[in-house]
């Protein structure tokens, strides 16, 4: 291989025989902060990025995991209808119950048919948000986002409160502690999800099947007893603490029609959670669409059967809702069906346990869905970007915190009473149904519809009907529940949608200001220090930091991007290679546990170690946006600067870039009638001028290098024929295996070469690919096997143009 031999000779010509080459260091012994040690003790070890790839769910497992919220609503839907009907219609309420249940089941059928199409067309998680965004644009999509977020928040409150009602129905002595129990359950779910509890799919699937099976036994037993004349009947008029039973009223009066609509709106809570399959469709195995569609149909059939069965048994037993929520209608139906025998009592407690489990499991579902939805909306720029960050255990921790806090406020404000919470519920749910229906109708009937689909008109008409029916339910619910709390939901829509749009405008304005690239770069001057410039995007703030770095006369300047999101890293890679950034190479450094400050500290410590205690200056671009920016952006530069203060031989320098000044100048000139674009460019060019940086930390003395590991201390290599990197000296040819720690990207203005750091548990080696700017598949975090002749680059072991193989993780 002539090319490889030439490259190897080039590396060897730079060797210095007096100084032996040594492997790159793997890590440094840096003390952990007390706060991180406490977090690790509470939440467990941090999960790495490659553990984020979830195992796809089978249909059976997905049904159990994703349908708990939906199926559990059958536990309180019938009760919510009766508590509205009984005070006016009296015992006639039980005759009205079944027709009203039939209407609800008809809506269930229509919505299911609509969402069967959604999961086939939109296999990306997001449900009605994605449908609205793709068909109506970002404005209407934010209505869907607010609807889904409110749905998730209220679901936590309703399901946990209903689960506590099931507990109190079985143990009446706990009646005085409902709020405390419910708050405690939410706090447990909050803590569990911070630890990664949402990953336990099989554990969450069990309550769904347990509840369906136990309620199936109750319904079948109750129907058999009814047919044989052995099913007991309650007397609602004598039940102490129950809702008052009216004397009856005509169905055609204005007041009666209003009550019927109110009861129907309450019964709509039985359909909550129906969108869960579409929100989690990406979790299914391939083929994703057909599997999700089949699971959705099964879930709807189970829900419809349970709602119909509970309503029928409530109709024939005259089960009555109580003002304090206990005993529940479903518990009365269960007691009547199973009887007072020993086995009947045992079965009653089993059913109550199953009801409690599925309701609490349903309360956990939003802790998975809400953070992902918030991350999705934040990626589109409509929510603060700190909602896109994964936490210690790979969960979107900030979203989990927001959800738990708001749900707790809602629970405390309503006293954990299900009836009061339902007033907040169905508006958000049916708003999502409305947008999904109209969005799918536009997809099939719009000018961009697929003309090859012969059934598109039928589908479009069906979807339009779903949108109309769901919109009607939203109006009914808003009117009949307005004074009971629905007004707050309406206000939330009116406030949150403009807020989300405002946040988007702020982000867009900031991006436009920072994307302007100056025509000339400041020429670098010689120095005797190593400078590391941390970059996350190619914008004015980063270029200004690079200009300042070049003015410090450094003998080496490294632009470093710590990889938290591989997709963002690839975009930066492409922008860096194409941009006029001079000859400064870009290093992509892995950060598997997303501890950004820790990764930077380790990188700087390694550089100081490898360059024999050289002074390392870390330049941190800091963008200032004013008061609003404090909410929309975190303070990463300050955190990294503080962390670097403990690294020997390191200096952290913050280069500020105030976006507000250029923006104000651009607006003032635009107001005077001058082109806003030209004035903004001039203001930004002026703002690019290098000023005195702030935030420098005091350097510390260099840390001594540890000794290499002895061969006898190492276990047998897991890859036959491979050598531990720490054992390599100067051999003709070796094979090494490890993890790619960093990748250096050369800009167009520099020489074409790709520098890759490969490390195992004993050390690291540099792989040099001459004539290559990138190699598909080689990126931070991947496992790699390389084979070639050992040379020396910058005092460290290297392989020039090695043969390589990507290894499975």
Image: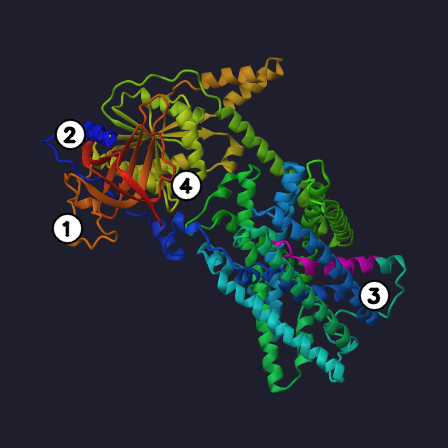
Q: Earlier in the sequence, mark 3 or mark 2?
A: 2
Which of 210/176 is in front? 210
252 vs 513, left or right, is: right
Disc 2 is placed on an element classified as loop
**Crowd rating for badge 3 (residues with CA inside 10 Å; few <14, some 14–19, many 20+):** many
Disc 4 is placed on an element classified as loop
Q: Earlier in the sequence, mark 4 or mark 2?
A: 2
Please, what is the dominant secondary structure of the magenta stretch?
helix
C-alpha span from label 1 to label 4: 35 Å
| Residue 638 inside the magenta-drawn segment | no
Disc 1 is placed on an element classified as helix
Which residue carries the number 2 mark? 15
Up-down: is 184 above or below 549? below
Q: Nearer the viewer, mark 4 or mark 2?
A: 2
- Tell me the magenta residue range: 258-277
Which of 474/773 is in front? 773
**Crowd rating for badge 4 (residues with CA inside 10 Å; few <14, some 14–19, many 20+):** many
723 vs 576, left or right, is: left
Residue under the image location 33 percent in, 25 percent down:
584
Up-down: is 237 above or below 278? below
C-alpha span from label 3 to label 2: 95 Å
Q: Earlier in the sequence, mark 4 or mark 3?
A: 3
C-alpha span from label 4 to label 3: 60 Å
C-alpha span from label 2 to label 1: 25 Å
């Amino acid at each position: 291989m002539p090319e490889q031999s030439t490259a190897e000779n080039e590396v060897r010509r730079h060797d210095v025989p007096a100084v032996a080459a040594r492997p790159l260091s793997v890590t440094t012994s840096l003390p952990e902060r007390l706060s991180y040690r406490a977090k690790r003790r509470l939440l467990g070890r941090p999960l790495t990025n490659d553990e984020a790839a979830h195992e796809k769910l089978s249909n059976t497992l997905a049904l159990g995991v994703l349908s708990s919220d939906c199926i559990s609503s059958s536990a309180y839907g019938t009760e919510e209808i009766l508590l509205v009907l009984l005070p006016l219609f009296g015992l006639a309420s039980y005759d009205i119950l079944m027709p009203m249940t039939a209407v609800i089941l008809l809506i269930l059928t229509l919505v299911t048919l609509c969402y069967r199409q959604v999961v086939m067309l939109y296999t990306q998680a997001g449900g009605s948000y994605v449908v609205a965004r793709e068909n109506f644009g970002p404005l209407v999509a934010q209505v869907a986002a607010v609807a889904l977020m409110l749905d998730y928040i209220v679901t936590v409150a309703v399901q946990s409160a209903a689960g506590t009602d099931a507990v109190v129905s079985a143990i009446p002595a706990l009646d005085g502690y409902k709020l405390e129990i419910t708050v405690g359950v939410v706090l447990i779910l909050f803590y569990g999800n911070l630890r990664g509890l949402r990953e336990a799919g099989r554990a969450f699937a069990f309550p769904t099947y347990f509840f369906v099976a136990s309620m199936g036994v109750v319904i079948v037993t109750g129907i058999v007893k009814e047919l044989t004349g052995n099913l007991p009947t309650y007397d609602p008029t004598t039940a102490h603490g129950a809702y008052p039973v009216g004397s009856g009223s005509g169905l055609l009066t204005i007041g009666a029609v209003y009550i019927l609509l109110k009861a129907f709106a309450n019964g709509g809570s039985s359909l909550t959670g129906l969108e869960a399959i579409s929100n989690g469709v990406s979790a299914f195995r391939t083929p994703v669409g057909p599997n999700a569609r089949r699971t959705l149909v099964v879930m709807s059939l189970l829900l419809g059967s349970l709602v119909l069965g509970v309503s029928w048994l409530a109709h024939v037993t005259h089960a009555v809702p109580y003002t304090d929520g206990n005993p529940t209608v479903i518990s009365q139906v269960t007691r009547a069906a199973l009887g007072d025998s020993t086995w009947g009592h045992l079965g009653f407690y089993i059913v109550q346990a199953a009801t409690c489990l599925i309701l609490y499991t349903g309360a956990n579902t939003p802790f998975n869905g809400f953070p992902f939805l918030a991350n999705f909306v934040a990626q589109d720029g409509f929510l603060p970007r700190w909602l896109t960050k994964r936490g210690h255990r790979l969960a979107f921790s900030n979203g989990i915190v927001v959800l738990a806090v708001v749900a707790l406020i809602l629970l405390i404000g309503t006293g954990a009473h299900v009836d009061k919470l339902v007033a907040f519920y169905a508006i958000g749910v049916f708003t999502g149904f409305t947008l999904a229906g109209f969005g799918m109708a536009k997809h099939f009937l719009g000018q961009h519809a697929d003309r090859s689909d012969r059934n598109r008109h039928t589908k479009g008409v069906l979807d339009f009907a779903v949108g109309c029916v769901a919109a009607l339910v939203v109006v009914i619910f808003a009117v009949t529940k307005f004074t009971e709390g629905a007004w707050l939901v309406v206000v939330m829509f009116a406030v949150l949608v403009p807020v989300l749009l405002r946040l988007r405008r702020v982000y867009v304005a900031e991006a436009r200001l920072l994307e302007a690239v100056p025509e000339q770069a400041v020429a670098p001057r010689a120095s005797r220090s190593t400078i590391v410039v941390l970059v996350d995007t190619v914008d004015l703030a980063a270029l200004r930091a690079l200009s300042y770095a070049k003015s410090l006369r450094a003998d080496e300047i490294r632009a470093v991007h710590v990889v938290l999101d591989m997709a963002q890293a690839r975009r930066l890679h492409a922008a860096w290679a194409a941009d006029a950034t001079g000859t400064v190479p870009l290093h992509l450094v892995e950060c598997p546990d997303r501890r950004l400050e820790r990764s930077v500290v380790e990188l700087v410590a390694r550089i100081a170690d490898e360059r024999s205690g050289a002074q390392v200056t870390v330049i941190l671009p800091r963008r200032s946006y004013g008061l609003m920016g404090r909410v929309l952006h975190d303070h990463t530069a300050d955190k990294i600067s503080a962390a670097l203060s403990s690294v020997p031989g390191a200096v952290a320098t913050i280069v500020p870039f105030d976006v507000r000044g250029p923006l104000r100048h651009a607006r003032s000139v635009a107001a005077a009638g001058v082109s806003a674009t030209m004035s903004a460019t001039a203001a930004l060019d002026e703002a690019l001028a290098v000023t005195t940086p702030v935030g420098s930390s005091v350097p510390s003395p260099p840390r001594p290098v540890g000794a290499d590991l002895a061969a006898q201390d190492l276990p047998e290599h897991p890859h036959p024929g491979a050598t531990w990197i720490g054992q390599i000296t100067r051999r003709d040819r070796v094979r090494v295996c490890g993890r790619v720690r960093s990748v250096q990207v050369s800009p167009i203005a520099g020489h074409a070469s790709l520098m890759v750091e490969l490390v195992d548990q004993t050390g690291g080696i540099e792989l040099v690919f001459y004539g290559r700017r990138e190699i598909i598949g080689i990126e931070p975090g991947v496992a790699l096997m390389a084979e070639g002749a050992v040379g020396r680059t910058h005092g460290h072991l290297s392989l020039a143009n090695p043969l390589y193989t990507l290894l499975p993780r």
